[in-house]
Image: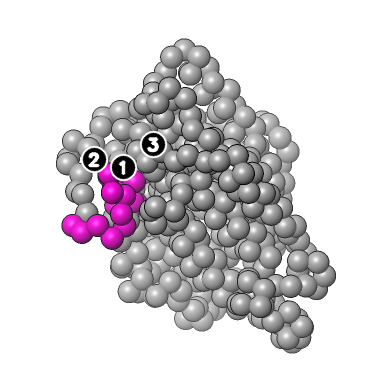
Amino acid sequence: MRPNNQALKHRLSHDTEREFGGTLGAICIPVFLPLTVLYLICMSRSPEASVLQWPPPLPSIDQLWDPLAPVLLLGWIALHALLYLMPLGKVSEGLVLRDGTRLKYPINGFHALCISGVMLMLLLGLGAPLGYLFELLLPLAVCAIAVSFLLSVYLYIRSFWAPPHALALGGNTGNPLYDFFIGRELNPRIGNFDLKYFCELRPGLIGWVVINLGMLMKEVELRGSPSLAMILVNSFQLLYVADALWNEEAVLTTMDIVHDGFGFMLVFGDLAWVPYTYSLQAAFLVMHPQTLSSLGAATIVALNGLETIATATGKRLLVSGWWGLVRHPNYLGDLLMALAWSLPCGFSNLLPYFYVIYFTVLLIHREARDERQCRAKYGLAWDTYCRRIPYRIFPYIY
C-alpha cells in the first residue's frame, strides 16, 4: 500500500488547480471578508446606509463586544450539535469516496429547525427580549468570525493525521496559506459527527432565520407592529431555509460536500457570512422602514414564486423545459429569489441589494467551476450539450 499512498500524495500535491485567486486570494479573503461583514452591519444601522459613505462609521470597542455574545453563540452551536446527534429522521449514505466507502449522514435538519422554532416561541411567550439581537449583531458577528478562525486552525492541524484518500483533491498543494483557506481534509469527523455537514445547514442557516426574527421583534418594539416589508423578508427567507432543510439529503451531492475540503472558506461562509450578511435586509428595515402597497407586495410575492424552477440530479444531461433554455436554471431561480428578498427594502439605498450583487458574482464563479468539472466528467458529450444549450444562467444574455 505504501507506493500507492506516495503516488496519491504526489498527485494530490501537484495536479491541482488553485482557485479563488490562489495564494493571493487565500491571504486577502480571510482579511477582507470578515471586515466586510462588520462593515455591512455598521452601514445597515447608520442613518445614510450608503455603501459609498467614506469614511465609514467605525464602531467603538463597546459596540464590538458583549459578554453575552459568546455565551449565546456557543450555546446555539452546542444546541444544534445535540440536535444533530438525536435519533430523529433517517440516515442516508453519501457518494462513494475514493477508498470505496460511503459515509452515513443523519437527515434531521428540518427537525432541528422545527425544534428551534418551538423553543423560540416559548421564549417569546416567556417575555424574552428577542429584539435585543439587533444590539448584539456586531458582537455576535465578531464571535462568529473568531470561532471560524479557531475551527479552521483546528481543521488544518488535524488534517495532517488524515490518510491520503481522505484529503480533498484541491486542498493539498503544499502551500500552507492556500491549504488552510481551501481546506485539506474532505470530510473531517469526530467519531460519526461530520463537522462539514453539520456546519453546512445547521447553526448558520437556522441562525439566519433567528436573526431575522430578532429584527422583526425589534421593529415591533420600535413601532408597535412589524411592517409588511419585514414580514415579506422574514417569510421568504424562512421558506428558503425550510426548503433547504426539508431537502437536506440533496446537499450530499453538492460541490461543497463532494469536492471542496473543509477549510476557512467554508467554515467562515457557514458560520459568519451566511447568518450575518444574508440577514442584511431585515437589519436594514429596522432603521429604514419601508411602505409597501398591496400591488407591490403581490408583485414581489409572484417574483419570489418563480424560484420554483425544478432541479435535477443524476447522470443524464437534460435538454427540455427550463434546462433547455440555460444550463443552470437553478442558479437563475436563486437570483430571481434574491431579488425578491431585496425589493421590499425599496430603491433609495443600494445596501439591501448587496446580496443580489454578491450572489450573482458567486453563482457566475460557481458556474465556471461546474463547467470545468462537467467537462472532465462527461467529455465530448458535454461539448455537444453546450452547443445545444449555449446559455449558462441568463437566457440570451449569458
Percent coordinates x, y for residue 312 in the rendering: 76, 61
- Dot 2 or dot 3, earlier in sequence: 2
Does residue 163 belong to the magenta stretch?
A: no
Cα separation between marks 2 and 1: 14 Å
Q: Amino acid at mark 2?
A: Leu
Other residues around mark 2 within 10 Å, as few (<14) / some (14–19) / many (≥20): some
Q: List the residue tagged with mark 1.
A: 45
Q: List the residue tagged with mark 2.
A: 64
Q: In this view of the protein, which residue sits in the foreground, 166 or 364?
A: 364
Cα separation between marks 2 and 3: 19 Å
Other residues around mark 3 within 10 Å, as few (<14) / some (14–19) / many (≥20): many
Percent coordinates x, y for residue 374 in the rendering: 67, 76
Q: In this view of the protein, which residue sits in the foreground, 8 or 193?
A: 193
Residue range in magenta is: 37-55
Tell me, yes or no, whether the two marked residues, 3 and 1, touch with CB atoms within 8 Å: yes
Does residue 52 belong to the magenta stretch?
A: yes
Residue displayed at 28% across by 49% down:
48
Can residue 321 be seen in the rendering of this structure? yes
